[in-house]
Amino acid sequence: SDSGFSHTRSSVTNLNKVVDMGDSFILPCQFDTSRLFDPTVVWSRSDLSPPTVHQRQLQGDELKDQNQRYSGRTSMKTDALETGDLSLNLTNLQLSDSATYTCSIRDFGDELSRSDVQLQVKGQQQTSAVDTSDITQIKLYYFNTVRITMLAL
């Protein structure tokens, strides 16, 4: 391969999130894409076919390969590629959205970075004796492990 002179920056960030069914949630992803010539951001789920949850290019969203179950439920900021905030807003969360989501950044097809966000959606328990305002308080806990691998190929 001719990748002898290119080097890949692969940083793996794992975030664990627990959110309620029906809520929306922003899956975080940051990368400085402003200096890239032909950036593509792909949010995906490797356990699905097709795996694409959302794809953004310079021209805008490219959703022809998007998995049907995410149709109409995903969005990124319009200026994402200028600001490097590549976070994905996922709405109307379903229990089946519980999964590991991968944010992959590519330039001319070469992957420069990827990060994983693990999302767990929990259903509403039987709320007979529970005040529903308590349920929304449990909204968000997460732990954060960052593993950064520098590869010079």
Image: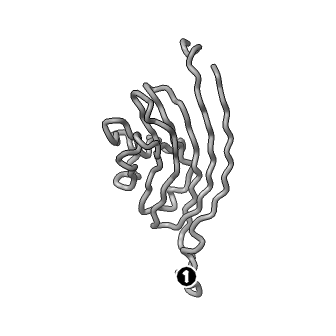
Locate residue 136: give its quadrant. Answer: bottom right
Q: Which residue is mark 1?
A: 127
The three-letter code of the residue at mark 1 reads: Thr
Q: How many marks?
A: 1
For this orientation, the residue located farthest to the bottom is: 129
Q: Is residue 67 left or right of residue 8?
A: left
Q: Position of residue 106 (x, y in %)?
A: 47, 31
Locate residue 3: give its quadrant. Answer: top right
Q: Mark 1 Cα within 10 Å, few/some/many (few <14, many 20+)?
A: few
For this orientation, the residue located farthest to the left is: 59
Q: Position of residue 16 (x, y in %)?
A: 62, 55
Residue 108 vs 129, above or below: the answer is above
Q: Position of residue 104 (x, y in %)?
A: 51, 37
Residue at the (41%, 40%) spot, across then down: 81
Please identify the quadrant where the N terminus is shown. Answer: top right
Q: Secondary structure at mark 1?
A: loop
Residue at the (63%, 19%) spot, across then down: 153
Residue 120 vs 41, above or below: the answer is below
Residue at the (54%, 12%) spot, across then down: 2
Which colour scheme appears in the figure? one colour
Q: Position of residue 25 (x, y in %)?
A: 48, 59
Q: Is residue 56 left or right of residue 7?
A: left
Q: Nearer the viewer, residue 104 or 85?
A: 85
Residue at the (50%, 56%) spot, across then down: 97
